[in-house]
Image (spheres, coloured by chain):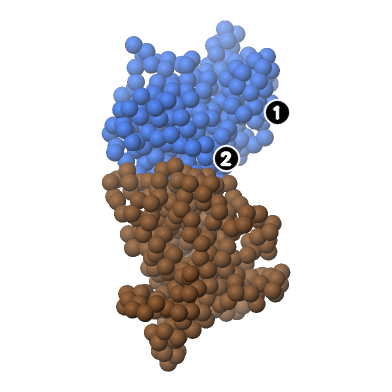
Chain colours: A blue, B brown
Amino acid sequence: MSITYLEAVREAQAHALRDDPRVFIYGQDVGAFGGAFKATKNLAREFPGRVLDAPISEDAMVGMAVGAAIEGLRPIVEMQFADFSVVGFNQIVNQAATLFWRTNVPCPITIRLPFGGTEGGGPFHSQSIEAIYAHYPGLIVLTPATVEDAYSMLLEAVAIDDPVIFCEHKFLYYHLKAEALPSEALPIGKARIAREGRDLTVVAYSAMVHEALAAAAELSAEGWEIEVVDLRSVKPLDTDTIMASVARTGRLLCVGESWPWGGVTAEIIARVASEGFGLLDVPPQRLNARDTPVPYHPNLWMAHRPTARAIAASARKTLRR
Amino acid sequence: MLHTVLDTPPVGETKAARDQTLAAYRLMLTARLLDDKYAALYRGGKIHGGVFLGRGQEALSVAIGISLKKTDIFAPLIRDAAGRLAFGETVVDAIRTYLGSALGPMRGRDGNVHRGRPLEGYLPMVSHLGAMISVVNGTLFARRLKGVSGTVGATCLGDGATSTGAFHEALNQAAVEKLPLVLVVADNQYAYSTPTSRQFVCEDLADKASGYGVAAHSVDGTDLVACLKTAGEAVARARSGGGPQLIVARLLRLCGHGEHDDSHYIDPKLKTSPLGRDCLKVAEEFLLRQQWADSATLEGWRTEVVREIEDAVAQVRREPAPDPYDEKWQAISSRHLIELHDEDSGS
């Protein structure tokens, strides 16, 4: 038996609904239809009245989740695409993210964002916008890269008493498979060494972890041993694991699928430069998507986002300095 | 019809109606005098940030607040001092938030009208207009999912907020879910300085209700008796399964947007029109004419309320201010997931 990343997302939600009567799911087409990606397939039937279609109203969807959280429930909101979550941005960053700080009342909501690029997705169905949420105090931002993490981190997200932005990569939905669901997992907030190496630390998250691993395999044939750190969680950021890896390798390359201005890769470089400058043998590098909207045609899309080949090329430059 | 109630009150008015009107008047008076005190403290430089008053809106505000049960949900807006008191807020809590007391519900983290106690059904507003409606929807939806019946949720807006996308999304959402929501719109002629002619072009904001498939109620917002009747009916209908209720009250804001605003832009003709009547005076005249109270009693109430407010201010001014060294600079409740930055270690 094997299970995909998408099925893991569905199974985690089924598990949460089964275990905790406070959990419900709200989003466009999530009910009888089972969601645009089928991440809630059959859940409306298994859990009557707890998996509900929402009108196309992202603002009101999040607002409703906040109200339900105040009443002690644990809503999961599915945004059909991460790109549309900005319509609910106000409720996420000004209502959900500030509630606990203002009132001491926790806001345990999970907002699922199917994000990241796929072939033919185009400018409004491909965005990676984890950084704008990580920028706001009061939010947890998760970016699972594996089937196991998609499952265990989503379960943990629902259990956390704070608002969680759960970024599920659409490219990984079908491409990634595991043998079984995990019985134990690293806790949220801990990064994972996805591959050990001594020559260069590549920090990545979500789909870019797999591009980085492919680059590491390519570079291995050339004699370089690349360490790949899978962040798992963008906020909180596990600076300790990154720093320990850089201490081993002396070289750092940060890879993100989102745009180059600011963002997660810039944050990591800033932290390593300010707190671990002495660990670096050469200037730290970063590789992001290009500073344009995400293009539609596969030829353009492949050249817009970092690929294994682009990561390997950047890594070689850093290694040869 | 509503004006006739005021001009020639029906004989045999029940004691309950009289008691409710008297209670509402006293809360309106308290809100007005509280507002006067905020304005004085503001002019004296004792308040950080803005002061937002509800002058002219007390009748509408108290009517919705007094029509709710303590187990209901209430999300007031900036001009709802009267409704807040009616729903159970204490004078001390209100003043604490304006003066930033560490003992207040917001502990100096937020101020003035941004106050509430969510676990008591009293939701603290964010500044983004229309944003509280869907939050109220969520509390009502949650009660239904938990099997708790009989809850009503009310929230207040001005005419300006009806132009927001949040208003549209949330009223439609409430209609789709058939939630017991009472949405109270004070059509007070100006959103800050913008007249309603630049805000909407429909004849009456209550006309919008039919587009959403929800019930509409129009009321003269200067008339306490009419407001009590309308709010009471709307709350009762929502409670008995009638779905969302939209109340639109026409009135005039009798102050600036905030105390920093001299409101010079308000059309003088509006001030002398029926809309410009002071609801507190209208209510007072009604009580005297009905002989439900005499002027000595009302004067006595005023003295008592002034003393209550002065005592509360004196108490709050002796309370500790928030201390940045004791402050927990943490925006999330999951302690194990808090990131520490240089700022937090004091370096």
Q: Position of residue A3 (x, y in %)?
A: 38, 16
Q: Position of residue B207 (x, y in %)?
A: 55, 54
Q: Is residue B196 left or right of residue B169?
A: right
Q: Nearer the viewer, residue A50 or A117?
A: A50
Q: Nearer the viewer, residue A195 or B11?
A: B11
Q: Position of residue B179 (x, y in %)?
A: 40, 48
Among the 4 quarters of the image, the one containing residue B200: bottom right
Say which element carries label 1: loop
Residue annotated with mark 1? A292
Please give the name of the residue rendered at 37% of the width and 46% of the height, measured from the top-left corner: B141
Please give the name of the residue rendered at 33% of the width and 27% of the height, measured from the top-left corner: A45
Q: Nearer the viewer, residue B94 or B324?
A: B94
Disc ID at residue B162: none
Mark 2 or mark 1: which is in front? 2
Disc ID at residue A87: 2
Q: Position of residue B220 (x, y in %)?
A: 53, 68
Say which element carries label 2: helix
* Mark 1 crowd level (few <14, some 14–19, many ≥20, 10 Å Cα): few
Q: Tell me, yes or no, if residue B335 can be seen here.
A: no
Decide which of tag 2 and tag 1 comes sooner along the chain: 2
Amino acid type assigned to the residue bearing label 1 in the image? Thr
Q: Residue under mark 2: which chain is it in? A: A
Please give the name of the residue rendered at 43% of the width and 34% of the height, measured from the top-left corner: A53
Among the 4 quarters of the image, the one containing residue A129: top right
Q: Is residue A107 left or right of residue B99?
A: left
Please give the name of the residue rendered at 62% of the width and 57% of the height, measured from the top-left corner: B203
* Mark 2 crowd level (few <14, some 14–19, many ≥20, 10 Å Cα): some
Q: Is residue A307 left or right of residue A241?
A: right
Seen in the picture, residue A240 relative to B308 is either above or below; the reply is: above
Q: Which residue ends up furthest to the bottom in the rendered image?
A: B296
